[in-house]
């Protein structure tokens, strides 16, 4: 069985600020957006994929990032 690819959101740095809120540096947000754009371009060439597939992939990355942000918030309290 093939090893699943890591989530892009697992590589994004998250900083917990003095107010206890998690933040992601602008540079990291740019990298994430460019990765999403590249994924969409790759899916566009796949006849078995459509915008629903792209949306599902983006939701998975968002869920991964949200989970990390929640964990970062809990670590600071």
Image (cartoon, rainbow, N blue to C red):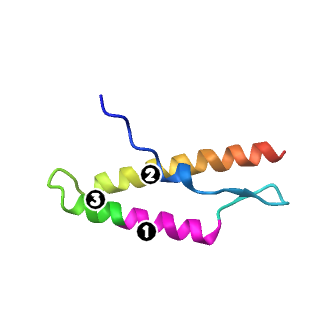
Q: Position of residue 45 (x, y in %)?
A: 18, 61
Measure the C-alpha gap from mark 1 to mark 2.
16 Å
Tell me which segment is drawn in magenta.
25-37
Quarter occupied by residue 55 = bottom left
First along the sequence among labels 3 and 2: 3
User: Which residue corresponds to the image point at 66% horizontal and 50% vertical from the top-left?
Assistant: 69
Residue 43 is inside the magenta segment: no
> Mark 2 packing: few (<14 Cα in 10 Å), some, or many (20+)?
few
61 left or right, relative to 26: left
User: Which residue corresponds to the image point at 34% horizontal and 60% vertical from the top-left?
Assistant: 39
> Mark 3 packing: few (<14 Cα in 10 Å), some, or many (20+)?
few
Measure the C-alpha gap from mark 3 to mark 2.
12 Å
Contact between labelled residues 2 and 3, with CB atoms less than 8 Å apart: no
Quick one: 14 or 57, which is closer to the camera? 14
Q: Position of residue 48 (x, y in %)?
A: 17, 50
Quick one: 67 or 10, which is closer to the camera? 10
Element under disc 1 = helix
Q: Position of residue 59 (x, y in %)?
A: 44, 51
Measure the C-alpha gap from mark 3 to mark 1.
17 Å
Mainly helix, strand or loop, the magenta region? helix
Element under disc 2 = helix
First along the sequence among labels 1 and 2: 1
User: Which residue corresponds to the image point at 39% horizontal and 43% vertical from the top-left?
Assistant: 5
27 left or right, relative to 70: left
User: Which residue corresponds to the image point at 25% horizontal and 58% vertical from the top-left?
Assistant: 43
Give the residue pinned by disc 1: 34
- Dot in front, 1 or 2: 1
Give the residue pinned by disc 2: 59
Give the residue pinned by disc 3: 51
Q: Position of residue 37 (x, y in %)?
A: 37, 67
Element under disc 3 = helix
- Dot in front, 3 or 1: 1
């Amino acid at each position: 069985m093939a090893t699943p690819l890591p989530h892009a959101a697992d590589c994004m740095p998250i900083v917990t600020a003095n107010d206890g809120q998690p933040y992601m540096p602008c540079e990291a947000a740019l990298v994430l957006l460019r990765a999403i754009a590249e994924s969409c371009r790759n899916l566009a060439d796949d006849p078995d994929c459509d915008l629903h597939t792209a949306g599902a992939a983006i939701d998975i990355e968002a869920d991964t990032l949200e989970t990390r942000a929640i964990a970062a918030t809990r670590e600071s309290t």
